[in-house]
């Protein structure tokens, strides 16, 4: 009987002291990546509408949908419980979606306003402003992605999981 109790105590100590399992870490990471991928699918749809010169109301509605999706993703990770004591990956997701939301609210909103101008009102200054906003968006997105990837790699190393690129991403 003493031997069984000792084994149970040892097993409970072992299971409590090691924290989350790598499988759980993979699932947590994959959940964030899924939301990021969905964000980029919606963003690509919005950019395609602009490229095809869709009606400004359709573009504005798609922008609104992307904003709402990003806001929901941010709120989800802001209120999600910490995955582990360090909570690094969840906080990196919060920072990532927060940055994307700011970009949608600021620079992208300005783009939508420019896009909505009647063709007769567009002048070279608007073209310069458009290019400047696009460059800013590309830069801010790349910084947000790089910052997230840095934390993601640290998280993967900590849990002994391998990150793989999918479809050249």
Image (cartoon, rainbow, N blue to C red):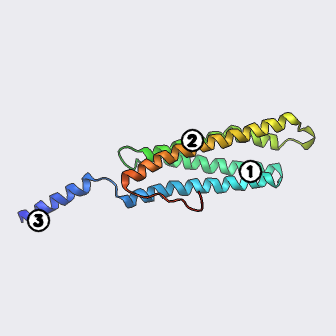
**Which residue matches tag 3?**
4
**Residue receiving disc 1:** 61
Residue found at x 82% / y 48% = 56
Residue 161's mark? none
- The percent position of residue 22, horizontal first and vertical second, equals 37, 58
Q: In the orientation shown, which residue stands out farthest toward the right?
A: 120
Report the residue marked by disc 2. 98
- Dot 1 or dot 3: first in sequence order is 3
Residue at 77%, 50% in the rendered image:
59
Structural crowding at the residue carrying mark 1, measured as other residues with C-alpha within 10 Å and reported as few (<14), some (14–19) or many (≥20): few
21 horizontally vs 16: left or right: right
- For label 1, the SS is helix
Disc 2 is placed on an element classified as helix
81 or 86, nearer to the observer: 86
Residue 93 seen in this snapshot: no
Q: Residues within 10 Å of mark 2 (few under 14, many from 20)?
A: some
- Residue 48 on image: x %, y %: 75, 55
Q: Earlier in the sequence, mark 2 or mark 1?
A: 1
Above or below, 110 relative to 5: above
Write down the quadrant of residue 9 in the picture. Answer: bottom left
In the structure shown, which secondary structural element does the residue marked by tag 3 occupy?
helix
Calculate the distance from the C-alpha at mark 2 to the C-alpha at mark 1. Answer: 21 Å
Say whether residue 95 is left or right of residue 26. right
Front one among 79 and 37:
37
Q: Which marked residue is nearer to the observer: mark 1 or mark 3?
A: 3
In the shown orientation, is residue 136 left or right of residue 155?
A: right
Q: Identify the residue at horizontal 51%, vertical 49% (top origin).
A: 76
Q: Is residue 151 left or right of residue 69?
A: left
Q: Residue furthest left?
A: 2
């Amino acid at each position: 009987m003493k031997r069984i109790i000792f084994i149970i105590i040892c097993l409970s100590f072992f299971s409590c002291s090691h924290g989350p399992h790598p499988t759980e870490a993979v699932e947590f990471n994959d959940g964030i990546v899924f939301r990021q991928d969905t964000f980029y699918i919606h963003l690509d749809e919005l950019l395609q509408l602009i490229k095809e010169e869709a009606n400004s109301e359709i573009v504005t509605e798609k922008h609104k949908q992307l904003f709402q999706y990003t806001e929901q993703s941010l709120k989800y990770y802001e209120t999600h419980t910490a995955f582990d004591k360090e909570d690094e990956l969840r906080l990196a997701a919060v920072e990532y979606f927060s940055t994307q939301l700011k970009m949608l609210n600021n620079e992208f909103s300005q783009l939508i306003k420019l896009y909505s101008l009647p063709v007769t009102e567009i002048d070279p200054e608007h073209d310069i402003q458009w290019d400047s906003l696009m460059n800013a968006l590309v830069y801010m997105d790349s910084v947000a992605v790089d910052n997230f990837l840095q934390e993601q790699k640290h998280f993967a190393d900590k849990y002994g999981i391998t990150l793989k690129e999918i479809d050249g991403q």
